[in-house]
Amino acid sequence: MTGWYRNGCCETGGDDHGVHTVCAIMTDDFLEFSKSKGNDLSTPMPQYNFPGLKPGDKWCLCAMRWQEALDHGMAPLVDLAATHMRTLEFVDLDDLKRFAV
């Protein structure tokens, strides 16, 4: 289950220091990029009930991680309608629109 609150929504609050607000659609390139940055999202972790992500999965991604991936040419596509408005504090709307599905 995705989202900071594990409710399936890219909601955020004061306790979400990573600002998990971008509804991103995983790609092989992004998953490898994230792993190279120390955040392995593709390996299952049964102890946390986490099956691991695969290309095509939607995941509430940290806004700053999405921006970093964009800066490195690895940004995943975005479900703009499911992305929280707070993302705009960190990411330009035009960039999000370019990657919107």
Image (cartoon, helix red, strand yellow):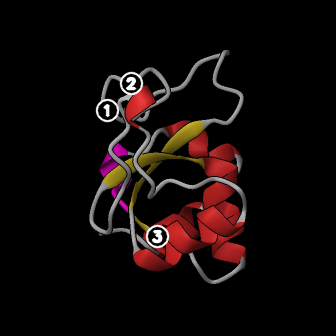
Q: Nearer the viewer, residue 56 or 39?
A: 39
**Which disc number belongs to residue 1?**
1
Q: Position of residue 4 (x, y in %)?
A: 50, 27
Q: How many marks?
A: 3
Give the overall secondary structure of the magenta segment. helix
Evaluate whether residue 96 shows in this view: yes
Q: Which residue is rendered at x = 70% and y = 80% of the image?
A: 72
Q: Residue furthest bottom?
A: 73
At label 3, the amino acid type is Pro
**Which disc number belongs to residue 36?**
none
Q: Position of residue 13 (x, y in %)?
A: 59, 18
Magenta region: which residues? 78-82
**Which disc number belongs to residue 6?**
2
Circle 3 packing at 10 Å, graded few (<14), some (14-19), many (20+), is: many
Circle 2 packing at 10 Å, graded few (<14), some (14-19), many (20+), is: few
Q: Nearer the viewer, residue 101 or 39?
A: 39
Q: Name the image quarter holding the C terminus.
A: bottom left
On whether residue 81 falls in the magenta region, the answer is yes
Closest to the camera, between mark 2 and mark 3, is 2
Label 2 to label 1, Cα distance in Å?
5 Å
Q: Tell whether label 1 touches label 2 (CB within 8 Å).
A: yes
Q: Position of residue 62 (x, y in %)?
A: 60, 46
Q: Which residue is mark 3?
A: 76
Which of the marked residues, 2 or 3, is nearer the chain's N terminus? 2
Secondary-structure class at tag 2: loop
- The answer to whether residue 101 is left or right of residue 60 is left
At label 2, the amino acid type is Arg
Q: Tell whether label 1 touches label 3 (CB within 8 Å).
A: no
Label 2 to label 3, Cα distance in Å?
21 Å
Secondary-structure class at tag 1: loop
